[in-house]
């Protein structure tokens, strides 16, 4: 369970970095980069959603919190770097 939560946390972190890059590419009108990143982000989010939904209710809550924590840290890291 702990390993799964760490992987979900890390996935949330990476996905948030991808979202930050996607937003930057959209702002700079880089059509192909934004298009590819949009697809990658969508696939990653749906894969994680299916993993989280397979859990029991309590495990799902912990998975959601791990994902949200990874997203938060990803935002913090991306904003500090910008």
Image (cartoon, rainbow, N blue to C red):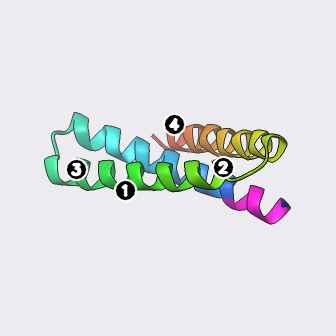
The stretch in magenta equals 2-7
What residue would you read off at disc 2? Answer: 52
Q: What's the mark number on residue 32?
A: none
SS for dot 2: helix
Report the side of 24 relative to 54 (left or right). left
Nearer the observer: mark 1 or 4; the answer is 1
Badge 1 vs badge 4, beta-carbon distance below 8 Å = no
For the stretch drawn in magenta, the main secondary structure is helix
What residue would you read off at disc 1? Answer: 40
Q: Residues within 10 Å of mark 1 (few under 14, many from 20)?
A: some
Distance in Å between CA atoms under marks 3 and 1: 9 Å
Say which label, 1 or 4, has the lower sequence index.
Answer: 1
Report x, y in % for residue 61. 77, 39
Q: Residue at x 16, y 53 (%)?
A: 32
What residue would you read off at disc 4? Answer: 79
Distance in Å between CA atoms under marks 1 and 4: 21 Å
Nearer the observer: mark 2 or 1; the answer is 2
């Amino acid at each position: 369970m702990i390993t799964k939560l760490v992987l979900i946390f890390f996935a949330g972190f990476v996905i948030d970095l991808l979202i930050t890059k996607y937003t930057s590419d959209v702002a700079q009108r880089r059509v192909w980069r934004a298009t590819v990143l949009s697809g990658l982000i969508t696939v990653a989010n749906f894969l994680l959603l299916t993993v989280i939904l397979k859990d029991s209710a309590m495990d799902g809550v912990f998975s959601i919190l791990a994902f949200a924590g990874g997203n938060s840290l990803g935002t913090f890291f991306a904003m500090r770097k910008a």
